[in-house]
Image: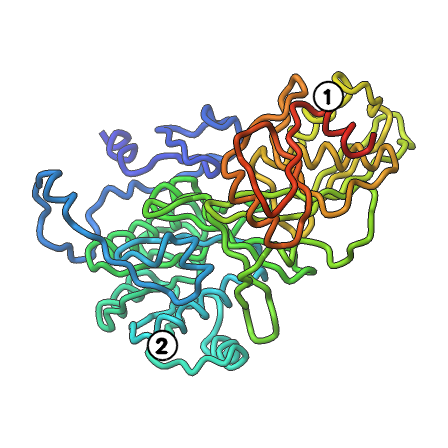
Amino acid sequence: MSRSKSSKKTKFVCSSCGYESARWLGRCPSCGAWNTFVEVRDSSRKSWLVEAEEPRPVKLREVMSIKRERIPVGMGEVDRVLGGGIVPGSMILIGGEPGIGKSTLLLQIAHRLASKGAKVLYVTAEESLEQMGERARRLGIDGENIYILAESEVRTIISRVEEIFPEVLFIDSIQTVYHPDLTSAPGSVSQVRECAAEFMRLAKSRKIATFLVGHVTKDGSLAGPRTLEHMVDAVIYFEGERQLGLRILRSVKNRYGSTNEIGVFEMEERGLVEVTNPSAHFLSETNEERMGVAVISLLEGVRPILVEVQALVAPTAYGMPQRNTTGFDPRRLSMILAVLEIITGYSLRNSDIFVNITGGIRVTESGGDLGVAMAIISSFRRIPLPPGSIFIGELGLGGEIRVVKGIQRRLDEASRLGFQTAYIPHTSVESRDIKIVKIKNIEEAIQSCVG
């Protein structure tokens, strides 16, 4: 009897994927990771938070007529990623590498909201009040309508929230907050799950928009169980290259908006500054002809962004050639190289190949395939591509150039930035402001550009 009771109070959860098991397992049957199961207490007990009145079933037609109000942040790049503003009662998880600027971004968001009259509570579980004050002075924030709480115990935090009753709540960070009923250390699977569940119940019952800051692992994914990502309404990554100063706010999950939008910022002494024309930052300022450089157009949501692709093809000094990429999928690079070898006959198997997407941006769509292929050919042949040209298209396994979505918006952006020629697939799209060269396959593109 005692064993059956104890088994109901504990379970084992994979810290990598969140898979639950009644007993400890050496290898997770879901994700295949080894030694990732940790023992957690069953969180099925009733929360101490006072719930609102019991919900009752309603007709879908009645729910459809409800219009959800949004709270605009006042920062265009943030509102774009969030889908137009903050939804009351939503819970947003923001992740990023240490020192990338998550706390700076959230403090600036709090300042914008407070300047519009919204009451904001910022809970710092990692830094002291003096450190927060120093950051606020550096950012030029007056601090009106912004309340700061240095606390890490979840019940105390929720008690203060009930006293102040803010419109927006910031928790920095969820890995440092702990629940006193759990014996595990802060940041463990059970602590993160239970604390996030308490904040979720608070957000939904009191209609308080909540931002959670999450740490990331070495591979760039959010630390803790994957169930944390399923619990929240939006998952946003704050990423970028520290040396370049550019930061990208990217949404990977959003129940209230698109997941394809990005926001671009630049880190300066006074904090983060919005970049309204990101294409100008990702393109080189020099107009000199360079080998192995091509310009591609990416479509992030409805926003076209022009970036440079740099490729370097060099004879290998080892038996196994290198294939290194920055901002581009290595598997897709292998596919492009295989197509170039089979279709065009170029022998690239004995060469080291490096591909870099400038500006710290990552290519997540296939519209940049043609530009990557042409940059590789340009470096291999030691012939610069035509100046003022842009490449748009997906490369098929047969060497054909396939159509991608949003070509007209990409062409309009290229024309606005002064490009003269666009190499695109065969479509019905026409433009008066830029010369269009329609190509069917990669051989035609190579013949048109490098002969």
Along the line of sight, the residue nearer the viewer: 310 or 235: 310
Whichever of callouts 2 and 1 sits on the residue coming sooner in the sequence is 2
Element type at marker 2? helix
Q: Is residue 312 left or right of residue 71?
A: right
Task: Pinpoint residue 263: horizontal percent, then vertical percent.
Answer: 50, 55
- In the picture of the structure, the residue carrying the numbered disc 1 is 338
- Establish if 319 lies above or below 211: above
Residue 328 in view (yes/no): no
Kind of residue at disc 1: Ala
Q: CA distance from mark 2 to mark 1?
A: 56 Å
Q: Is residue 356 left or right of residue 5?
A: right
Along the line of sight, the residue nearer the viewer: 249 or 23: 249
Q: Quadrant of the N terminus?
A: top left
Kind of residue at disc 2: Ser
Residue 235 - label: none
The part of the image, by quadrant, that contains residue 396 is top right
